[in-house]
Amino acid sequence: MNILKYLKIFSFVFLTYNLSNSQSAYDIIKKSEELLKGKTSHGKFKMTIVTSEFTRNMEMESWWIGNEKALIVIKSPKREAGNKTLKIKNELWMYLRNTETTIKIPPSMLLQSWNGSDFTNDDLVRESNLIEDYFLTLIGEDTIDDYICWKVELKPKPTSAVVWGKIFYWCRKKDLLPVKIEYYDEKEKLIRSLVYSDYKIMSGRLIPTKWTMLNHIKKGNRTEFEILDVKFDVKISDNFFSFQELEKGR
């Protein structure tokens, strides 16, 4: 076999493998994300924010249409009850009940903490864009908490205005439910990890009901997000996601 023919065969195999690998990674992340969301959802949640100085609990109720629209209403503690967050596509507003004011969150504040947690405003706005804003590569198999997982690497596309320099995403091979996500900055320093646990059936669907965001910059800080109840694919009017609804007493 001459060298030219060998190179052609090698190039074809290499290209075919990469296309297959990329498509598999795309399918894995797309399916894993869809399993958590449904077309619409309505749920009640508890958030526990843990720092070296205090522990704070919040309960909230939320309505979502995919990842395009959302309304989140804080139910407790009493001093924050009635505060709301409205998301419409890539824009975010907050309503503060005590002052009866509505604030639009500017792009410069998207990396700010959402209500003092280890989740950011950007998490609410950009969570749906993993398969659009990143190149996906299937690294292979890995084991996390005794689960055999697919491990996928995500690196930002040159044209994407994203926060993270790299992401690693693990999901269970048997059902593609997420297990862990690691977020790195542009210098490849690990900033935080999102760990999924307590898999239960809710609304006829198996999901992780506890999400723990670990802060690797402020050691010991974490935010635990617990799903108390959720219904998927429920009917929600588009009118629900409006300034009238945002500023209405609830």
Image: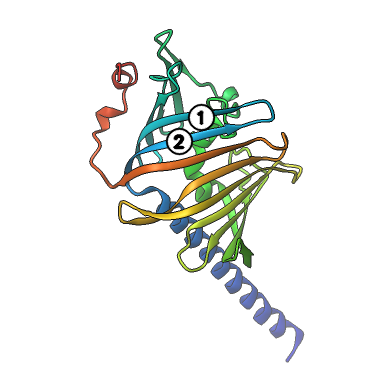
Residue nearest the viewer, comparing 228 with 141: 228
Considering depth in this image, is 134 or 147 the residue closer to the camera?
Answer: 147
Point out the image quarter for the N terminus. Answer: bottom right
Dot 1, how many residues are within 10 Å of its Cα: few (below 14), some (14-19), or many (20+)? few
Q: In this view, does 217 lie above or below 138?
A: above
Relative to 77, say whether 136 is above or below. Answer: below
- The tag on residue 215 is none
Q: Which residue is drawn at 33% across and 42% down?
A: 41
Judged from this view, the residue extending furthest toward the top is: 99
The reply to whether discs 2 and 1 touch (Cβ–Cβ < 8 Å) is yes
User: From where the camera sits, is residue 66 visible?
Assistant: no
Residue that mark 2 sits on? 46
| Label 2: few (<14), some (14–19) or many (≥20) C-alpha neighbours in 10 Å | many
- Residue at the bottom extreme of this rendering: 1
Relative vertical location of residue 216 with respect to residue 144 in this rendering, above or below: above
Q: Which of 201 and 160 is in front in this view?
A: 201
Residue 160 at what x, y percent from top left? 58, 41
| Quarter location, residue 147 | bottom right
Image coordinates for residue 204, horizontal then vertical, percent = 31, 56
Numbered label tally: 2
Q: Mark 1 points at which residue?
A: 57
What SS does tag 1 mark?
Answer: strand
Instruction: For the C terminus, give its image quadrant.
Output: top left
Measured as percent of width and height from the top left, residue 249 is found at 30, 16
Q: In this view, does 124 lie to the left or right of 249?
A: right
Residue at the image position 51 percent from the left and 55 percent from the top:
178
Which of marks 1 and 2 precedes in the sequence?
2
Query: Is residue 93 toward the left or the right of residue 143 in the image?
Result: left
Q: Where is residue 82 in the image (x, y as percent from the top left)?
A: 38, 19
SS assignment at label 2: strand
Q: How far apart are marks 2 and 1 (CA)?
A: 7 Å
Give the amino acid at mark 1. Asn
